Image (tube, rainbow, N blue to C red):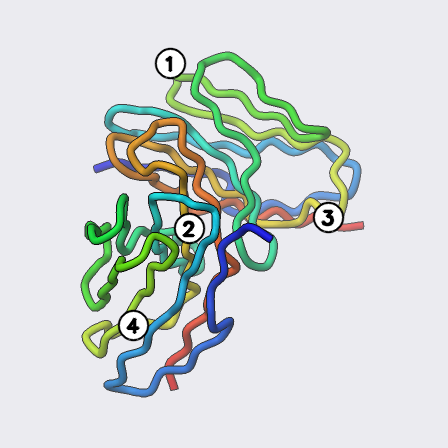
Amino acid sequence: DGGITQSPKYLFRKEGQNVTLSCEQNLNHDAMYWYRQDPGQGLRLIYYSQIVNDFQKGDIAEGYSVSREKKESFPLTVTSAQKNPTAFYLCASSIDGGSWKETQYFGPGTRLLVL
Amino acid sequence: EDKVVQSPLSLVVHEGDTVTLNCSYEVTNFRSLLWYKQEKKAPTFLFMLTSSGIEKKSGRLSSILDKKELSSILNITATQTGDSAIYLCAVKGAQKLVFGQGTRLTINP
């Protein structure tokens, strides 16, 4: 079964805590992305990676960190520096991040809530 | 700064009606425009448009791009309750995909 998986489905964060959201894909896609979705604001790009061991900041990278040690995996850490982390987080992947013909495919999302 | 604006933000219609959703953009080095449908979780891909004036169609859904007007419309005919969702428009520019705010469509029986 090919696709993108995200875990956990729901995540609760305490004040001052770092939490990590998992994203895995078995589509053999080179590029992976993290978006944040808030009500009425659409999707905003946090980080993206076009190839293993390389990643770039998106529009709202502050308070987040990522790694891309394997092609299949692109975990996102929400650090304590992110003051308003409550949101729905979506991971996506595409065959080739540089191609204008790309289509991004999304995972099921993780909803992060602050306790 | 690249920008994508969708309208209306919210729309409520009765089953069987036809709806038109709008997307306008200001993006450097336009490459393509995509429409997604988001029900509860992951946005699912509907259409990708690259050429002006060519309609893409899938069942009751269709979409067309107007590069002169920097806009696109998504039409849904004979709407059903299962069409209720957030419809997202996204435009690929020089480097990344820029999303609009989405249109929340509700179909009442």
Q: Secondary structure at mark 1?
A: loop
A80 to the left or right of B8: left
Residue under numbered circle 3: B82
Q: Residue at x 41, y 73 (%)?
A: A112
Q: Nearer the viewer, mark 3 or mark 2?
A: 2
Q: For the residue marked with disc 1, what is the amino acid?
A: Lys
Q: Residue at x 27, y 57 (%)?
A: A68
Q: Which chain is disc 3 placed on?
A: B
**How far is the residue under mark 1 from the one under mark 4?**
39 Å
Q: Residue at x 72, y 29 (%)?
A: B59
Q: Which chain is disc 1 placed on?
A: B
Residue under numbered circle 4: A84
Q: Which chain is disc 4 placed on?
A: A
Question: Front-most of A98 and B99?
Answer: A98
Residue under numbered circle 2: A92
Which numbered disc covers residue B68? 1
- Do pointers 4 and 3 mark residues of a single chain? no
Is the C-beta separation of discs 4 and 2 under 8 Å? no
Indicate which disc, 3 or 1, sits on the residue closer to the N terminus. Answer: 1
User: Compared with residue B23, is residue A77 higher up or lower down, i.e. above or below?
Assistant: below
Q: For the residue marked with disc 2, what is the amino acid?
A: Ala
Q: Which chain is disc 2 placed on?
A: A
Question: Front-most of B81 and A35?
Answer: A35
Residue A85 locus on image (x, y percent): 32, 72
Residue A47 locus on image (x, y percent): 26, 54
Residue B46 locus on image (x, y percent): 57, 36
Indicate which disc, 4 or 2, sits on the residue closer to the N terminus. Answer: 4
Q: Residue at x 19, y 75 (%)?
A: A81
